[in-house]
Structure formats: structure tokens, C-alpha cells
Image: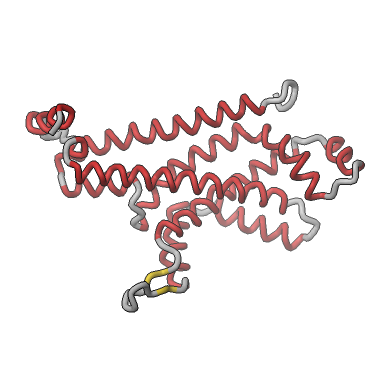
Amino acid sequence: MNAFQQYFFDLAQQHPKWNFIYFYDPVQTERVIDGLWMTLQLSVICVIFSVIIGVVGAWVQGAHSKTVRLLMQGYIQFFRNTPPLVQLMFFYFALGQFTPTYSPDGWLEVPIISNVGWAIISLSFFAGAFNVEIFRAGIEAVPESTQEAAEALGMNRLQIYIYVVLPLAFRVTLPALNNNLVNLVKTTTQALAIAVPELLYQMISIYNDYSTAQNACMLFLFFAYIVLVGILVFGMHRWERGMRIPGYGQ
């Protein structure tokens, strides 16, 4: 053991209720790193997909077809009005039963969508439903005269949305989008319900194996999410300041 590991080992001997085992046991350290890496991957992928869903969904809401608009409203109401934990379990245990499988060794049947895949799908659609409404509000804040001017220049509806409306709407929506993405990152902990080995899952596994590590695990988990969310908020605020147009969206 090095000095760092020895300190926490001695601390565990002197104060058994504060057993930071993941700081001196290499096996537990690896479990924490794996859990943190899975949480980061889950958060980043879900954030990206949910923003894409929000952008596309907001555009679809302005479609000429009433059927398309109603389908989008149905999606929004379904995901906004049901708990994300119920959605996770529905996707994994209900829809998961109908997904095709493959056999890598000729014996074991493995679903083509893993529990991690279902977590990404469920959480992305959950946050995406809120993002659709956030972007819709931003689009409505763009003056009609601006869109009419773009139309007068010969742009079609999609070009107006991509090159004129969306860049302006994005600046208006960033504060609300920031809040929703922060909630999404915190909601990734619910992937524990379908055994996704993210940080909370690994921490619970550690203190189930070593009951004296419970306090230390919860303390690490608490500060880990403070740091993770803090980085996201800081980045979003920097992005918001960088995209600000003087006199617009204030």
C-alpha cells in the first residue's frame, strides 16, 4: 500500500463506520471507476439524444398534417405524465420481451438491446418530451417578421427552421434546457432498477458486500453527483454567455 491507501486503511480500523474501502482495495476501486464511467456515458449519450429529439419534435409540431401533430402530442403526454422509473421498467421488462435475440456461442440467447440500451432509449425519450416543449416555446419567441423575411428570400420551411428559427430559438431556450438536462443526469440513477452498472448500482453493491462502507459510499456518491452536475451547469452557462446576442432574448 502507498501512503494514501494506508491512511484510509488505518481510518477504517480506527473508525469502522467510515470504511472508504474503494480508496485502498484495488478491486473496489475498479468497481467505482467502472460505475462512474458508465454514469458519464449514460449521461452524455442521453443528453445528446434528448436534445436531438427536442429539436426534431419541435419542428414536427409545426407540420401541416394534423395526424403528425397529434402523434407528437401523444408522445409528449405519454412521457411527461408517467414516472421515468415506470417507463424504464416498461421498456425493459415489457418491450424487451419482444426484441430479437442472437446467440454468440450457439447456446446463450442475448437480446440485441441490452439493459444499458433500454436505459438510453427510455431516458432519452423521457427528457426529449420536455425538450420538445422547451424548443417549441423558443420557436414561438422568434418574431414572425423574421420568418417572413426568410420566406421572402426563397427559403423553404426546413431551411427557415435550420438556419433562422433554430439558432435564435436555441438562445432563448438555453436556461430551461439547462434545468432539464440537469434533471436528466440525476435521473440516470434510476437505471439501477434494470441493473445498469452505473455509479449508484456499484456503490450499493460495495456496501452490500461491506456493510461498514455504507456511510463512505453514500458520501462519495453525494459529492460525485455534485461535481458531475456542477460541470454540466458550468458548461451550459458558458455556452449561454457565448451565444448571447446583445438586445435579443433578454
Residue 122: percent from the left, percent from the top?
49, 56
Q: In which quarter of the image is the C terminus?
A: top right
Residue 212: percent from the left, percent from the top?
14, 40
Residue 17: percent from the left, percent from the top?
14, 34
Among the 4 quarters of the image, the one containing residue 216: top left
Q: Which of the colour schemes (rainbow, by chain, secondary structure, one colour) is used?
A: secondary structure
Q: In the visual, does 244 lie left or right of 4?
A: right
Which residue is at 49% across, 37% downward? 182
Residue 41: percent from the left, percent from the top?
43, 46
- Most extreme residue toward the top is 246
- Image position of 74 with respect to 41: above or below: below
- Most extreme residue toward the bottom is 106
Which residue is at 25% across, 45% downward? 30
- Most extreme residue toward the left is 13
- Between 237 and 105, the one lying in front of the other is 105
Which residue is at 59% across, 37% downward? 177
Q: In the visual, does 120 lie left or right of 215?
A: right
- Between 52 and 215, the one lying in front of the other is 52
The number of numbered discs placed on residues in the rendered structure image is 0
Q: In the visual, does 170 lie left or right of 148?
A: left
Among the 4 quarters of the image, the one containing residue 196: bottom left
Q: Quadrant of the N terminus?
A: top left
- Image position of 124 with respect to 111: above or below: above
